[in-house]
Amino acid sequence: MSRARQPPLVTGISPNEGTPWTKVTIRGENLGTGPNDLIGLSICGHNCLLTAEWMSASKIVCRVGPAKDDKGEIIVTTRSGGKGTSTVSFKVLRHEKIGILDQSAVWVDEMNYYDMRTDRNKGISPLSLRPANPLGIDIDKGKVPLKDLESMFPGMSGDFTSENFSATWYLIENHSATSFEHLRVASGNLKKQASKKNEGSLAYVKGGLSTFFEAQDALAAIHQKLESDGTEKVEGSMTRRLENILNRASNTADTLFQEVLGRKDKADSTRNALNVLQRFKFLFNLPLNIERNIQKGDYDVVINDYEKAKSLFGNTEVPVFKKVYAEVETRIGALRNLLLDKLLETPSTLHDQKRYIRYLSDLHAPGDPAWQCIVAQHKWILQLMQNCKEDFIKEQRVGGGGLELDGELRSSALSRISHTASLKRGSSFQSPRDDSWQYKSPQQVRFVEKLSDVVISQLPNFWKLWISYVNGSLFSETGEKSGQVEKLKKNARQRQNDFKGMIEEVTRRLVQLVRGALLPTTLPQEQRRLYGGWDTKTIHPGAWLTQVIHTIRLTHDALSALEIPNDMLQVIQDLLLDLRMQCLLTTLQQTAEDVKRLPEKEDWIVDNEGITSLPALFEQCMVQMLQSLKEPMECKPGEANVFQQELAQDEACKLCVGIMKAFINCLEQLSTKTDGDIDTSHLSVEMGSPDVFGSIHEDFSPSPEQRLLIILSNCQYLERHTFLNLAEHLEKHGFTTADKITRVSREAVCELDERLFESYIEKKSDPIVGSLEPGIYAGYFDWKDCLPPTGVRSYLKEALVSIISVHAEVFTVSKELVPRVLSRIIESVSEEMSRLMQCVSSFSKNGALQARLEICALKDAVATYLTSESLASFKQALEALPQLQSGADKKLLEELLNKFKSSMQFQLTCFQPSSVQPVKR
C-alpha cells in the first residue's frame, strides 16, 4: 500500500532537556492520524513508545527513557508516513543514583551498586550505598604511593565513608592533577548536594509534582470507570483483588524494611543528636569549662562565655538547652558566691578588690558587692587598730615598759620618721648614769607609730575604693552595663553620709586610742576604760612626745593628700593641739627637774669674769629645751598656735618662772652648804694679773665666804647676761610672756643677790668693825691724856690689813665685786669711827691730833671706795674733833700722814684706782 502522507517532522520539544523519566511534549507535522498509526518513538536512541500518548497530528506526550546518548534527535515513525526526521534535539541530564531508601517519584530499576571499598561489583546493603564520586568530577588518580599517604596522615583514611576520613588524603589520591577550575566546580557540586539534602521532602514533592498529578488523574479515571460498570463493591472484583495485592505488598515491604528502617531512624536520630552536640558544643561543654576556668582563676573567660550563652540561650524554650543552661546558672551562682567571699576576705589589695567587684558586676550579682566590700574593709580597719592596742597592752604586761625597737616597726610605712636631733640632749631627759635610754622606746610611742602605720597603709586604699565606687570606674563600662552602672553610682551618691561616718569613725578611733595611750585624762571615764589600760606611772619625756607629734603629723598629711575633707580630719588637728600643749608642759616640767640637778655639776672653777660653768650649763639646758620645742611648737598649715591658747600661755609662763626660780634656789642652796654637804673640789684661779699676795694658790677647798662670792658673781652674770639672752630665745621661739618671765626672774635673782651680799658683808665687816674700839683703847689709852702722836697706831693698820685681805679674797673671785664689797665695808668702818669719835667727851690737844691723824689716814687710804655715806661718816667724825689751832700741828699732821703712806705704800697699792675700776650696779 502506497504512502499517502508525508513523513513525520519534529519541530519542537518541551522541555528540551531533563533527567530520565522526564515528561516531554513533542510538537511537529504529520505525527500520525491516530494512536494506532503511531508505531515508533525514540528520544536520544531510546524507545519511548511505551509511554507515548498521541494527542493529535501535531502533538505527542511521552516520558524520556534512560537513553544511552546524552544528546540526540527525536524520531517519530507512523504507519502512514514512515520514519520521520527532527529539526530539534533533546539533552538527557544524568541525575544522582537514587538509593533504595531514598524517596523518588518514579520507578527505579534495580541494579548492582559499586563498592569502592572492595573494588568489586556486588550487591551491598542500602545503608552502605554511597556515590562513587562525591565531587561529581572526573577522577584523576595521582602517582603518590599509598605508603607515603599513610605516613603523611597516620591514623587517617582517604575513604570518605570512614570515621577517620581525611579530605586532604582523598584529594591527593584522586585529584592531584585536577585543575583549580575543576575543583571549584566540585565545590559547587558539594554545595548543591548539601542544599538538596536540606530541602528534604519539599524538594521531593516539587520534583515529582507532575507524577502526582498523573497518578491522581489515573485513579480518578479508574474510579469513574468502576462506578459506571458497577463492579467497585463486588466481592472478588478487580479493585478488591488489587486492594488485597497492594495491602500484601505494603505488609511485605514493611516486613522487609522494618529492621532496616528502624536502624536508619536510630542512625538518623543519633546523627541528629551528634549534629546538635557538635553545633551547640559551646553550650554543652560550658559547665565543665566554667569549672576548669574557675580553678585556673580565668574569671574573665568565664564571664565572657556566660554572657555569650545568656544572649544565645537565656530565653530558649528547648528543654535540653534549658536543662544545660540551668546547670550553667548554678555554676555561675557558685562563682558569684566564691567571688564575693574573695572580695570580703581580708587583707586584700585594692587591685584585687576592684577586680572582684567588676567580675560580680558583670555577673549581675544581687545586692551591691562594692558597698559590702567597703563595709567589710571599714570593720577590718577598726579591728586592726583595736588588735594593735591589745597586742601592745599584752606586751607591756608581759615584758614591761621601754623595749627595744624591733626592725619590723622601723621598716613600716612610717619608716620615714626619724629620731629628731633633740632626742640626744644629754642629761635633760635621763639620769647621768643611764646611757642606754636612746635605744629604748616607750610602749605608747611604739604603739602610736604602729597604729599610724595601720591607718596610713589601709585608709588610702579604702578612700580610693570609695572614689572608684562613686565615679563608677569599679564597674564594667560596656553599653550593656551602662544602665546598671548608673544605678550603682546613684546608690553610691545616696550613701555618701554613711561613708563619711565611716571615715570619721576611723579618725575618731585613731584619736581615741592615741589619747588613751598618752592623754588619758582628756577622755571621758567610759572611753578611758575602752581605750586606756596603759601604764600611767611612766612620764614620757618631751622628746618622745615630739616624735609622736611628728608621727601624727605624717598621718594627717598622708590623709590630706587623699583630698579627704578637712572637717573629717579636724579631730586629728585637735589631737595635735593637745599633744603639742602636753609636749610643751611636759618638756618645761622635765627641764625644771633637770635644772634642780644642776648643782651636782658645780665644780667651783671660775673664769676671768668670776663665774663658774653653772650659768652656762643653765643657759645651755634652756636653749636645748627651746630647740626641742621648735618642731612641735611650729605651726603647720591648719594648726593653731599653742602660745595663743590662754591656758597654754599661763601654764608655760608659770613653768618657765618656776624653772628660773628653781635655778636661783639651787644657787642659794650652794651658798649655804658646808664642806660636808658638797663634793670637795678645787678652785682654779685664772686672772689677768698675777696673785700679788700669794696667799691664795690654785689648790684649796673653797670656804663658805668664797662660795658666797662665787654665787654672787654668778647672780650678777645671770641678771646682766643669761636672763637677757634667754629672753631673746624665748621670744624667738614664740613665748608671748618672755618679758614677764625675764622680769620676775631678774627680781628673784636680785633678791637672792641682796641676801647673799648682806650675809657676806656681815661676815667680813663685823670682825673689822668690832676690832676698832678695843684697838683704840688698848693699853688704857685716853684721849684726854695722851702723848704727842708719832704715827698711826697699830689697830688702824690691822683694820686696813683686814680690809686688804677682803679685797684680795674678792679680787680673786671677781674684780667686779671689789668696789661693791669694799665700799660697803668701808661704810661700816667709817660709821663705827664716827660713832666712837662722837662718844668721846673731850679731847686733849694731843688726843685730837692723834684722832684726826688716824681718821685722815684711813680716809686717804680707802679714798677710791668712798661713798656718800662713808664721806658723811668721816665728816661727822672729824667734826667731833677739836680744830687744829697752830700751823705746827697741821705740819705735824701732814708729816705723819706722809710717813704712814710711805710705810704702807706696798699694802695700800690695791686701793689705788689703777688697780681696779669701780663698777656701778
Image (cartoon, rainbow, N blue to C red):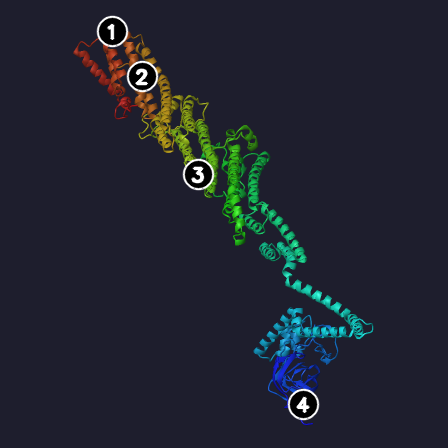
**Label 1, on which residue?**
843
Please identify the quadrant where the N terminus is shown.
bottom right
Q: Which residue is mark 2?
A: 799
Q: Is residue 816 above or below residue 477?
A: above
Label 4 and label 1: CA atoms lie apart by: 218 Å
Q: Mark 4 or mark 3, which has the lower sequence index?
A: 4
| Three-letter residue code for mark 2 | Ala
Residue denoted by label 4: 80
Local secondary structure at mark 2: helix
Q: Nearer the viewer, mark 2 or mark 4?
A: 4
- Residue type at tag 4: Ser
Mark 2 or mark 3: which comes first in sequence?
Answer: 3
Residue at numbered disc 3: 421
Q: Indicate the amino acid at tag 3.
A: Ala
4 vs 1, front mark: 4
State which tag comes first along the sequence, 1 or 3: 3
Q: Camera-side residue: 50 or 123?
A: 50
Rendered image quadrant of residue 225: bottom right
Circle 2 residues within 10 Å: few <14, some 14–19, many ≥20 = many
Where is residue 584? Give x, y as percent: 44, 31
Q: Quadrant of residue 319?
A: bottom right
Reading the chain from its start, which is encountered first: label 1 or label 2? 2
x, y percent for residue 57: 64, 85
The x, y position of residue 576, in whole percent, is: 46, 35
Quick check: can you spot residue 100?
Answer: no
Vertical side of 119 occupied by 619: above or below: above
Q: Which mark is residue 169?
A: none
Q: Give the residue type that dot 1 points to.
A: Phe
User: In the rendered image, is residue 499 in sight?
Assistant: yes
**How much space separates mark 1 and mark 2, taking CA atoms?**
23 Å
| Distance (Cα) linking label 2 and label 4 | 200 Å
Question: Nearer the N terminus, badge 2 or badge 4?
Answer: 4
